[in-house]
Image (cartoon, rainbow, N blue to C red):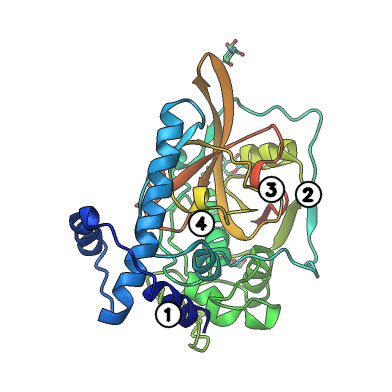
Amino acid sequence: MLLGLLLALLGCAAALDPALQEAWEGWKSLHAKEYPEEAEAARREVWEKNLQRIQQHNQEESQGQHTFRLAMNHLGDLTDEEFNQLLNGFTPARREQPALLFQASAVLKTPAEVDWRAKGYVTPVKNQGHCGSCWAFSATGALEGLVFNRTGKLAVLSEQNLIDCSRKLGNNGCHGGYMTHAFQYVHDNGGLNSEHVYPYTATDTSSCRYNPQDRAANCSTIWLVAQGSEVALEQAVAAVGPVSVAVDASSFQFHFYKSGIFSSMFCSQRVNHGMLAVGYGMSQEHGRNISYWILKNSWSEVWGEQGYIRLLKGTDNQCGVANQASFPML
Ligand SMILES: *[C@@H]1O[C@H](CO)[C@@H](O)[C@H](O)[C@H]1NC(C)=O
Ligand SMILES: *[C@@H]1O[C@H](CO)[C@@H](O)[C@H](O)[C@H]1NC(C)=O
Ligand SMILES: *[C@@H]1O[C@H](CO)[C@@H](O)[C@H](O)[C@H]1NC(C)=O
């Protein structure tokens, strides 16, 4: 309904830049976009506006005003509101699952840099499509790391299994969910299927098709990382492996992030998007050391640094990264 109204409003006000015709056609063909004739002008206007804002930001970046660059991507025909409605499906849980608390320890020493991708713990970047199932991708990511740790084998796990089967725990398919409730499902169910036998469809209207013959993961306990503590999160990532996190991904800059170390005054502490912390590191920028988190996203490899973002670490809990961190254990 919202979409219809938007299209109607923009449709009659369309003032398109003819110089962008070729770029628009190229973008449509690159991402296999097709629109009904009456919708195309409105979509192009949204895309042009996004492109303008991206170019503006990159110009500011080249003048030293930002530490990261933006780029047009496959989601460039969405307004900020549509983007958030379609893709950001995490809401902080009100009623938490029974869980253990991981707190920062004064004696635990962590390495200066950690990257679980290099240790074989992380599967290739996935694509959630137009479905607010980030929570399921974040959860499978943490479970994939756990399975690798225990078996030495990297199994690609099924988000669709979580979407179809964890409704009674309070998850809501393409309309949002919680990583902790996904872990709880795996715990209660006694397993989770692999992506191979239970493939992703980016829809949430199927009934549960879990097959106990193909158990590819387990979970016996759920841990919450002390809320808001980047020190505890660093220790968890260093000691355990990839950890599920949630961030505020609602800003335009986040939607079109391409490279560099992300920090934005438009990022709040209200988290709405599930991701996976796979490590952290430090980079020298203009003679200063800047620490960052390495977060895996589920918006395909087109987005960010081959599907990942480096997010400013250790200063002010940027984008609320430490507010809802959790991981499963065996
Ligand atoms: C799994 O984790 C434990 C403890 O965190 C570690 O000692 C072990 O080397 C890990 N196994 C693999 C295969 O990475
Ligand atoms: C899960 O747990 C069961 C029972 O403890 C065990 O037999 C099985 O190998 C485990 N599977 C995985 C993938 O860890
Ligand atoms: C940056 O980090 C390196 C390695 O940890 C350290 O040797 C160096 O002194 C740091 N530089 C600054 C400016 O803090």
Marks 3 and 1, how far apart at CA: 36 Å
Instruction: Pick whichever, 278 or 146, lies toward us.
Output: 278
* Mark 3 element type: helix
Q: Which mark is residue 66?
A: none
> Which residue type does callout 4 highlight?
Glu
Marks 3 and 4, how far apart at CA: 24 Å
Q: Which residue is mark 1?
A: 8
- Image quadrant holding the C terminus, namely bottom right
Q: Which mark is residue 144?
A: 4
CB of mark 3 near ligand 3 (< 8 Å): no
Work out whether mark 1 precedes mark 2 in sequence or the reverse, and give the earlier one. Answer: 1
Q: Are marks 2 and 3 in contact (CB under 8 Å)?
A: no
Using the rendered image of the protein, determine whether residue 64 is visible from the camera's viewpoint: yes
Position of residue 154 relative to residue 219, above or below, is above
How many C-alpha atoms fall within 10 Å of the one at disc 3: few (<14), some, or many (≥20)?
A: many
> Which residue type does callout 3 highlight?
Gly
Q: Is residue 229 left or right of residue 114?
A: right
Using the rendered image of the protein, determine whether residue 259 is visible from the camera's viewpoint: no
Work out whether mark 4 precedes mark 1 in sequence or the reverse, and give the earlier one. Answer: 1
* Residue 140: % across, % down: 53, 62
CB of mark 4 near ligand 2 (< 8 Å): no
* Mark 2 element type: loop
- Judged by depth in the image, the label closer to the viewer, 2 or 4, is 2
Marks 1 and 2, how far apart at CA: 43 Å
Q: Which mark is residue 227?
A: 2
Work out whether mark 3 precedes mark 4 in sequence or the reverse, and give the earlier one. Answer: 4
- Judged by depth in the image, the label closer to the viewer, 4 or 1, is 1
* Residue at (66, 41) in percent of width and height: 318
Q: Which residue is mark 3?
A: 320
* Residue 31: % across, % down: 27, 62
Work out whether mark 3 precedes mark 1 in sequence or the reverse, and give the earlier one. Answer: 1
